[in-house]
Amino acid sequence: MPACIACGAETPREQMYGAPDELRCRACAQKSYAPFEVPRSGRRTKVRTPVTIVVAVAAALATLYYGSDPAGPVRYLIADGEDVWRGEVWRFLTCVLPHVNLLHLVFNLYWLWRFGRAVETWMGSVAYAGFVALVAAGSSSADFLISQGGIGLSGVGYALFGLLYALRRDKAFAAEQMHPQIVNLFVGWFFLCILLTYTKVMPVANVAHGAGAILGWLVGKSILVRQRVPAIVGVSVLVLGIIAATQYMPWNGAYAAHRGAQYAKQKNYAAALVWYRKAALAYPNNREVANYVRYLEREVQAANEEAAQP
């Protein structure tokens, strides 16, 4: 009969929790201060996971529309730079629904279905909906901040992986999901995607993968500590900070052109020139940007000459 690694009490295996090499009795497992009930393996209960189902169906429909008409109404779901910089940050939530193709969709839905149902059953639908919204917005905005965005549920999938990985030593249902083969698969796929992007074989939202995994892990660890509410609030503030940072991205050439165009509409050509010069540095081979810089230089020079006349 196995012994609990925390208290040493010998307990039947079916009454213990955690990874096979770190089994705990129920009393010790509950000392992690997790607020949710730990589902027992093999328990015959009617599982209801409406959030997982709704997200999966919405993703399938959005992908179908995106494939048939990328410029149609589905474009309002995507976190495009111009729209985000106008303050439409809600797009960081909706951009996880459309996918590039059927393979992309099937891969993400498989892990959403496998991980999401287990987490939603344990966490409850309301808390799980909040978790999905948090990690979707966080992973999407982080990817937008670094590489100006992507689409799909990959960031949410990696967040579920990160959450389960953080819980695997304290919750039996998480340990059952985190087989070594699955851990190796997610880690290997993460680095393979970076290689595919670097070699220009296939662009992948690698930042969303990494940010999702980190956010999921942080939420998992926050759930396990005694002061879990302040910890989860801290993760939420971090996500809000990332979203806020997307509203000012001076290092990004597209953002610089956007700001320059806004100032040009206001006929503030001096400020527009400053931003378009930044855009020209980011896009040295872009003739349109270069021509507009020259146009603004002439406008600024003419304005200065007019102001200098007595």
Image (cartoon, helix red, strand yellow):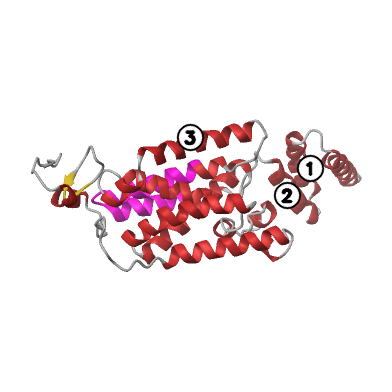
Q: Nearer the viewer, mark 3 or mark 2?
A: 3
Callout 2 secondary element: helix
Compared across the picture, whether 275 is left or right of 5 comes to right
The label nearer to you, 1 versus 3, is 3
The residue that mark 1 highlights is 273
Few, some or many residues within 10 Å of mark 3 (<14, 14–19, 20+): few
Q: Residue at x 40, y 65 (%)?
A: 49
Choose between 185 and 38: the one closer to the eye.
185
Distance from disc 1 to disc 3, alpha carbons, whole Å, reads 45 Å
Residue 83 location (% of width, % of height):
67, 57
Q: Is residue 25 above or below residue 63?
A: above
The answer to whether 162 is drawn above or below residue 265 in the figure is above
- Residue 193's quadrant in the figure? top right
Where does label 3 land, which residue?
A: 188
The magenta stretch is: 210-239
Query: Where residue 132 appears, x then y in whole percent?
Result: 45, 57
Q: Nearer the viewer, residue 248 or 95?
A: 95
- Taking 43 as reference, is 146 left or right? right
Decide whether residue 80 is among the magenta residues. no
Residue of label 2: 258
Closer to us: 43 or 187: 43
Identified by mark 3, the residue type is Gly
Magenta stretch, main secondary structure class: helix
| Label 1 crowd (10 A; few <14 / some 14-19 / many >=20) | many
Evaluate if marks 1 and 3 touch, with contact meaning CB atoms under 8 Å apart.
no
Q: Earlier in the sequence, mark 3 or mark 2?
A: 3
